[in-house]
Image (cartoon, rainbow, N blue to C red):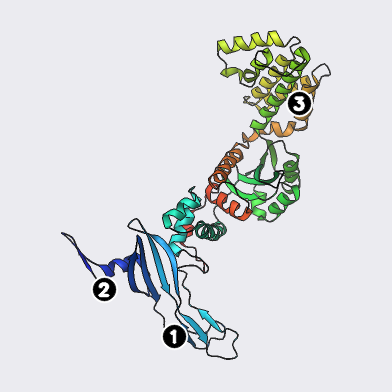
């Protein structure tokens, strides 16, 4: 092997020393270095003594020296390869079932991986922090699948070994998110996000939103984890309500604030559209008062300035002859005021008053239906004022999940999807990755 001295005004560097620093592994001998195009390639081998058979423990003899190339981290901004000249041995014991085996070293590369260990761990962290697999693959000058396979391999190990990732929490959030659309008719497959609402991290993502599937996941969790859950946040989902009832009967269920207001807005819009048709006989057009006012109705009263308030009242007076839309708007604002109450008893009285008003037979059918829904979820709505928790953290994590879906241009393999999402939104301890050994 030819050595070259690289001199500067202060220091003389030996090329062999530089190569040993680039490899940086004990008992690894550097055989050669070459560069073709812009790619650096370092050929290495293990320094081995007597080798014993893995099964019978008899002395094994060298059979041949296969050369396997691995993609390594870039060197000075250029792609790099490690060419590992391996040792393939055969067992001298004729009764042994092991005919031959190849020497391994997890420090260099994991089995079946095409990246070196350090490159694989680096790629896993890069993708886990939000970079695309394709972007990382281009930087390493390798194929997309080469990077994706190590991200799945090391990502799975990291999530299993990082036992402190899921901290002690007293609040668990459940929410559904769309996984994929498949088939000619774009059949939707949903998943369930399980969130630590207190610490704002994604605990896991499940390939189903069915009661049985979610309950099965909770059943697999440690008893200490389940016993510590004091609050369960959810939207107005009967499925997730049933999950909490069965698996966490002692947890106080809290209906998400966002979905309660969203529900009120949806019934307000139902009233507006019905009155529109009853009044003018057609759906809203750009010159119709109730069409012009639709966006103002969905805004909070405190966000309207004097001009906007005047416009709202004027348009309602023109298009809402029986004041049904105005009444629905007042109910919606009353529900928003419910969440502004500081006192639990006052909040409970306020909500009961809303329900009593809505379920009166004199009220529009839409508001009566809203009242019945609020009555069903009454206790879970009031529980918000006990802990001031909502499913906002889960909804925020769902936004992170959607970002990973956009970055990945969609997913079809749920295992890949789960690992990518948890690496990004599950807040793993990346220092644990350094200590992970994959043979």
Residue lying furthest left: 9
| Secondary structure state at the residue bearing disc 3 | helix
- Quick one: 102 or 171, which is closer to the camera? 102
- 266 lies left or right of 137: right
The local crowd at label 2, few if under 14, some if 14 to 19, many if 20 or more residues have their Cα within 10 Å, is few
Q: Is residue 391 above or below residue 4?
A: above
Residues tagged 2 and 3 counted as in contact (Cβ below 8 A): no
Q: Which image quadrant for residue 237? A: top right
Q: Position of residue 26 (x, y in %)?
A: 37, 72
- 269 lies left or right of 94: right
| Secondary structure state at the residue bearing disc 2 | loop
User: Which label number is shown at residue 237?
Assistant: none
Q: Is residue 99 above or below residue 134?
A: below
User: Which label number is shown at residue 2?
Assistant: 2
User: Which label number is shown at residue 370?
Assistant: 3
User: Which label number is shown at residue 50?
Assistant: 1
- Quick one: 158 or 346, which is closer to the camera? 158
Q: Quadrant of the N terminus?
A: bottom left
Q: Which image quadrant for residue 55? A: bottom right
Q: CA distance from mark 2 to mark 1?
A: 29 Å
| Secondary structure state at the residue bearing disc 1 | loop
Q: Position of residue 251 (x, y in %)?
A: 70, 43
Q: Is residue 109 above or below residue 275?
A: below
| Foreground label between 2 and 1 | 2
- Quick one: 236 or 208, which is closer to the camera? 208
Dot placed on the residue nearer the N-terminal end, 2 or 3: 2
Dot placed on the residue nearer the N-terminal end, 1 or 3: 1
Dot placed on the residue nearer the N-terminal end, 2 or 1: 2
Q: Residue at the spot x=60%, y=90% of the render?
A: 95
């Amino acid at each position: 092997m030819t050595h070259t001295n690289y001199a500067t005004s202060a220091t003389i560097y030996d090329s062999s020393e530089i190569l040993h620093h680039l490899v940086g592994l004990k008992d690894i001998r550097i055989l050669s270095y070459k560069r073709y195009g812009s790619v650096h390639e370092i050929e290495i081998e293990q320094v081995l003594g007597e080798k014993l058979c893995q099964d019978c423990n008899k002395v094994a003899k060298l059979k041949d020296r296969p050369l396997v190339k691995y993609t390594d981290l870039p060197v000075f901004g250029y792609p790099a390869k490690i060419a590992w000249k391996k040792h393939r041995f055969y067992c001298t014991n004729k009764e042994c079932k092991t005919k031959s085996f190849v020497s391994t070293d997890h420090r260099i590369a994991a089995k079946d991986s095409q990246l070196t260990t350090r490159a694989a761990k680096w790629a896993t962290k890069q993708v886990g922090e939000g970079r695309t697999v394709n972007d990382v693959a281009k930087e390493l000058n390798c194929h997309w699948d080469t990077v994706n396979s190590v991200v799945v391999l090391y990502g799975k190990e990291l999530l299993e070994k990082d036992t402190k990732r899921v901290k002690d929490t007293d609040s668990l959030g459940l929410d559904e998110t769309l996984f994929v659309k498949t088939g000619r008719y774009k059949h939707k497959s949903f998943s369930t996000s399980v969130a630590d609402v207190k610490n704002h991290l994604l605990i896991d993502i499940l390939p189903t939103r069915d009661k049985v599937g979610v309950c099965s996941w909770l059943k697999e969790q440690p008893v200490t984890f389940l016993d510590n859950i004091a609050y369960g946040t959810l939207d107005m989902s009967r499925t997730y309500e049933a999950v909490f009832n069965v698996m966490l009967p002692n947890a106080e269920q809290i209906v998400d604030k966002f979905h309660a207001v969203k529900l009120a807005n949806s019934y307000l819009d139902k009233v507006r559209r019905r009155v529109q048709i009853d009044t003018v006989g057609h759906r809203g057009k750009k010159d119709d008062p109730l069409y012009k006012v639709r966006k103002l109705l969905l805004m909070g009263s405190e966000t309207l300035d004097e001009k906007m308030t005047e416009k709202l009242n004027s348009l309602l007076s023109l298009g809402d002859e029986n004041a049904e839309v105005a009444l629905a708007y007042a109910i919606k604002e009353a529900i928003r005021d419910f969440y502004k109450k500081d006192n639990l008893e006052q909040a409970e009285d306020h909500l009961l008053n809303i329900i009593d008003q809505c379920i009166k037979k004199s009220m529009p059918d839409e508001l009566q239906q809203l009242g019945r829904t609020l009555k069903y979820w009454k206790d879970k709505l009031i529980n918000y004022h006990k802990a001031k928790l909502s499913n906002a953290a889960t909804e925020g994590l769902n936004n992170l999940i959607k970002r990973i879906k956009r970055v990945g241009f969609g997913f079809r393999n749920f295992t890949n999807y789960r690992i990518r999402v948890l690496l990004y939104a599950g807040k793993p301890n990346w220092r644990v990755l350094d200590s992970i050994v994959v043979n």
